[in-house]
Structure formats: C-alpha cells, structure tokens
Amino acid sequence: MKRNFDQSMKRKLIQIAAFGFSNTHLLNFKGGKIYEGKWKQFCNPGLNCYSCPAASLSCPIGALQAVGGSMKFNFSFYAMGILLAFGVLLGRAVCGYLCPFGLIQELLHKIPFPKIKMWKGFLYVKYIMLVLFVILLPIVATDYMGMGKPAFCQYICPAGTLEGGIPLLLAHEQLRQTMGPLFILKMTILFGTILGSLLIYRFFCKGLCPLGVIYGLMNKVSIYHLEVDQSKCIGCGKCSRICKMDVDPVKKTDSVECIRCGKCARECPRHAITIGFGKKKEKRGL
C-alpha cells in the first residue's frame, strides 16, 4: 500500500512541476499581460493556453491549427515536429504527467460530488473536435488574406477560457465591454467542463480533447509503453476495475484512452503489468 501511495505521489509531483514550468510568469496576472518572450516559440506538450498571462510556452492546439491556417509554415511544421517527438517518446503519458489542464481536472474530480461513468459514445466526440475544429475549419474558414481561424481555440477550448479569457477580462475593462454571444458560449462550455470533471474523471480528456487523440494514437508506437505478461496474468480483472480511464489493459495495452498513469501496474497482484521505457516483448496470446 505504501509503495502504491509513493508512486501516486511521484506522478502528482511531476504534474505539479510541469504545471509550474508551463506557467512561470505569475506576476503577469496583476496587469493582465501576456508573456511574449523567446520561450513562446516553443510548444507546450500539454494543453495550456497561449493567452494565459502566466504561460511560458505556446498552445499545442493553436500550433496544430497554424499548420492549416498560417502562411508561416516553417513555424507550423516546427511546432508539429515537437508534438510528434513527445508523442513518439511518451504517447499519452504526456496527458497523464505533463498536461496542466489534466491536473486541473483531476483536482476538480477530488471534490466531494456524485461520480458517474462516461457514456462510451461520447469518447468519439474528441475525434470530431480534431478533424473539424483543428484541421478542417482553419483551412476552409479563411479571411480576406487567406488566413485560417483557430476554430477550436476561438469557439471551444475551456482551458483557454479559464486560463486566458477570464484573467484578461478581469484585468482589462475595455475587453469586458466587448463581451457578447461568443463569450457566453465559451463560458457555457467551461461550466459544462467543470461540472463534467466533478462527475467524471478527466471529462475533457476523455470526450473533447483533440490533443489526447493525437497522443493516444501514438500509444501504439511510443517508447514509453505498457506491457502485460500473459504468463503471470490470472485474469482477476482488478486492473480494469481500478482504471479511471475505463481501459482494460489486458485486452488493449495500446488503448488510445490510456494515459499511462501506472495505477493498473501498481495494483496488479501478480506484477504482470509493467510500464516504462524499453524494448517491447513479443505479444503472447491469452
């Protein structure tokens, strides 16, 4: 039990450290300023709004939209390369360890509130978010200069509303005077996300996050991976029952939903599950 607690604390400390590194300019909240220094040319591996006054790095979703919508393809492909590098190295472990908005959701879920499981069909909404709002709309919905709009950031992203929109509105009266239907829409999505996170573990990650789709698909090739030794597995099902992402690691070791938190490996009574770096072993049948 103590070992499981220590491992869980290690992950939480890594999450807090990643959150702190992603948001080092806390004093900018006072004046509602946005850091625009040299670090903003780098892309944050996890979801963290560019417009957050404390943000040190660029938004990964914004960078992805720039691939289709920007004429500066050199920066777009550079940002895309960073995301792919993190994906190949860690897969969706980025979500489990390095994503600031993922940490916020986990803390919200700890608040005493009724808990439910997400309807399986809602898991596919995030694919629509990726294809429609991150890829297609920035290409199709262009202005008179041929520049695409960052549709996901502009119309959907609750992380942007929480980390960037609200702090900037509080700091600048002139921005508050421009609030309209779009702000109401985004606040509605934010409140829905907060409520969803109280009810469901990592609600946004499971159902809405397009970045999670990309990293999840990279689980199949990532160097940091999960393996199950079928010769040790006794089929007790404890790993699937303990998983808060609703994954059965025995059946789907490379599931796109798995954030590699390691809880299944820590709870396995036969130590049949391992997570880490290293060469993948040949899979055996059940």
Image (spheres, rainbow, N blue to C red):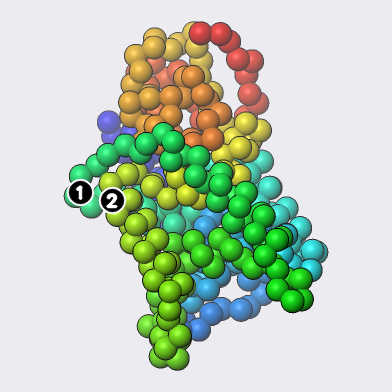
Circle 1/circle 2 CB separation < 8 Å: yes
Q: Label 1, secondary structure: give it.
A: loop
Amino acid residing under circle 1: Phe
Crowding around mark 2 (Cα neighbors within 10 Å: few <14, some 14 to 19, many 20+) is many
Which residue is painted at 49% across and 19% down in the image? 251
- Please tell me which residue lies in front, 36 or 159: 159
In the picture, the quarter occupied by the N terminus is top left
- The mark that comes first in sequence, 1 or 2, is 1
Q: Position of residue 174 (x, y in %)?
A: 45, 91
Which residue in the structure is indicated by mark 2? 198
Q: Is residue 262 visible?
A: yes
Q: Is residue 17 visible?
A: no
Which residue occupies 56% across, 78% down?
35
Q: Residues within 10 Å of mark 1 (few under 14, many from 20)?
A: few
Q: Where in the figure is residue 70, as x and y percent of width and height?
A: 74, 67
Vertically, is 267 above or below 58? Answer: above
Observer-nearest of 234 and 2: 234
Task: Find residue 2 and name its label.
Answer: none
The image quadrant of residue 240 is top left
Within the image, what quadrant is residue 175 found in? bottom left
Q: Residue furthest bottom?
A: 174
Q: What residue is rendered at 70% in x and 73% in y?
A: 143
Cα separation, mark 1 vs mark 2, equals 6 Å
Percent x, y of residue 153: 54, 64
State the count of labels: 2
* Left or right relative to 141: residue 259: left
Determine which quarter of the picture holds residue 114: top left
Give coordinates of residue 272: x percent, y percent. Answer: 45, 18
Q: In the rendered structure, which amino acid carries the disc numbered 2?
A: Leu
